[in-house]
Image (cartoon, grey):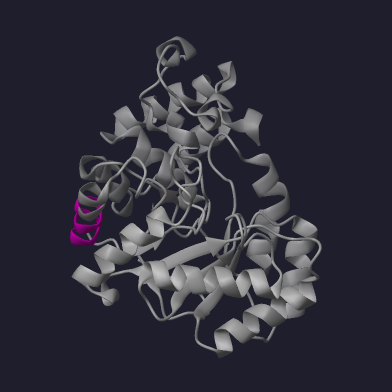
Amino acid sequence: MAVIKGTKFDVFPLNLGGNPFGWTADRDATFEILDAFVAAGGNFVDTADSYSIWAEGNEGGESEREIGAWLKERGRDKLIVATKSGELQGVEGRSREATYKAVEGSLERLGIDQIDIFYYHYDDENVSIDNQIAIANDLIAERKIKHLALSNYTPARLREFFEKSAGTPARPVALQPHYNLLARKEYEENVQPIIDKHGVAVFPYFSLAAGLLTGKYASEEEIAGKQRTGQLEGYVTKEAFEVVDELRAVAKELDAAPTTVALAWLIAHGVTAPIASVSNPEQLTDLMAVKELKLSDAHVARLDKASAPFA
């Protein structure tokens, strides 16, 4: 478990992504997944008001509603809930009006009185950092959110945010960057120094590179003809499969799943809890195993070397 600095939250080292809920996981599957997650020691779920606007027939808010239904039946105290706003139509951007409407919408869908961690999902450069901080301070003072976090901000805007929010309730307690074995350069060069300086928690998205780092695909030919998202296509290169080969080799030596090893590599690099999602409870086993798997320095070095083209 890991305490998020500046909060009272002690989180399991796997942040369960809520994007499948109301999409590839219907209500029954959502309940089964969350029940199994909590039974295995999990306590931290991540969602957004925009999940899952990309699915045909969905308008956003589906994930929050499914989580809210589970919380109503199982109990609010069972989960630390993080959600995000900035993309959902009608409440886009970081203006005061849009942000307040977004928070109210999330609270209603989740069926809770206060959001544990609220992310500014995307920056809005039409709204100054000073104003964004003021909005968050007011949301915290009104007990609509407990803590603020940030995602998808440029390094320059991140630095400004931390400098200007220092000593205020709106100082972010976490960042949610894009980081994995196949996406290292931007994070390690530009974001990690900010995290190290300010001592904030880090919960990366695409921790498993849209599924490529589960090890179930060993070549582009294995993917060909199968339904896949554009997100996965963006990772498919010869160098990426060389990383997957090494990941599978390390996993075999450790008698572990490639999924678990990929997540453990992130934790070895200072990540608090990687975000990963599942569409059925059976897929949770490899995710939850990250709590028990600590990579040796030698194994970390091997994976670092294999993924060096992405650093």
Residue 108 drawn above or below residue 222:
below
Q: Nearer the viewer, residue 58 or 276?
A: 58
Residue drawn at x 37%, y 72% as measured from the top left = 10
The residue lying furthest to the bottom in this view is 141
- Residue 31, located in which quarter of the rendered image? bottom left
Q: Which of 222 and 253 is in front in this view?
A: 222
Q: Nearer the viewer, residue 28 or 145?
A: 28
Please give left or right for residue 76 compared with residue 171 in the image: left
- Residue 255, located in which quarter of the rendered image? top left
Q: Position of residue 297 (x, y in %)?
A: 46, 44
Q: Is residue 169 in view? A: no
Report the span colored magenta: 32-39
Please give left or right for residue 203 compared with residue 225 in the image: right
Residue drawn at x 49%, y 58% as measured from the top left = 48
Q: Where is residue 98 in the image (x, y as percent from the top left)?
A: 65, 69
Quadrant in which the N terminus appears: bottom left
Magenta highlight on residue 128:
no
Please give left or right for residue 209 compared with residue 94 in the image: left
Quadrant in which the C terminus appears: top right
Q: Position of residue 7 (x, y in %)?
A: 48, 79
The residue lying furthest to the top in this view is 221
